Image (cartoon, helix red, strand yellow):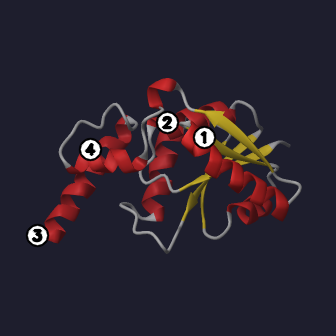
Amino acid sequence: MKRAVYPGSFDPVTKGHLDIIERAAALVDELIVGVLNNNKKTPLFSVEERVKMLEDVTGHIPNVRIEAFSGLSVEFVRQCGAQFIVRGLRAVTDFEYELQMAQTNRSIDRGVDTLFFTTELNYAYISSTIVKEVAFYGGDISGFVPPQVVDCVYNRIQAKKRENN
């Protein structure tokens, strides 16, 4: 069985993420989307909320499973019995960092390879950070995130604004 893991924070999941998920899932028997629980960052959404959002937007893809994890991605990949890590590349600037990570992961576990997917051009500029920034200032994010996620982002941003006032 060919199994891959697509790790990330997905805070929130974007249309670019979903594009990579759909394309990667078409190449493997099972794709596990690993939602990173990183204690060093303060995400907009809890890991449980991010898992739920991903389950909602990937429900149409039968061979996708969503799981939370913490620690090294390569260790999570090993625990899942996967052979591949999936990573998306938006621009050349992503490549240098992702190449270093792929080489590091390969040195930790020679049985794990990294598959790079270039993002569709219409999603190349989208990041979770940009989504949050646009939403914070009341901009339209409907072109950036799946429809199920739009209101979640706006509602959470408004709640954060109320907390800070």
The answer to which of 154 and 112 lies nearer the viewer is 112
Q: Earlier in the sequence, mark 2 or mark 4?
A: 2
First in sequence: mark 3 vs mark 1: 1
Percent of width and height locating residue 163: 18, 70
Mark 3 or mark 1, whichever is nearer to me:
1
Whether residue 99 sits left or right of residue 142 in the image: it is right
**Left or right: 15 as drawn, with respect to 4:** left
Residue located beneath label 1 in the image: 88
| Inter-mark Cα distance, 2 to 3 | 33 Å
Q: Where does label 4 land, which residue?
A: 134
What is the three-letter code of the residue carrying label 2?
Answer: Gly
How packed mark 4 is, by other alpha carbons closer than 10 Å (few <14, some 14-19, many 20 or more), is: some
Residue 146, image x, y percentages: 40, 36
Q: Is residue 57 above or below residue 160?
A: above
Q: Which mark is residue 54?
A: none
Q: Which mark is residue 16?
A: 2
Crowdedness of circle 2 by 10 Å Cα count: few (<14), some, many (20+)?
A: many
Q: Residue furthest left?
A: 165
The span from disc 3 to disc 1 (Cα, nearest Å) is 37 Å
Which residue is located at x 74 percent, y 46 percent? 4
Amino acid at dot 4: Val
Classify 159 as above or below 131: below
Q: Is residue 27 left or right of residue 6?
A: right
In terms of sequence position, does the residue under pointer 4 or pointer 1 come before the other?
Answer: 1
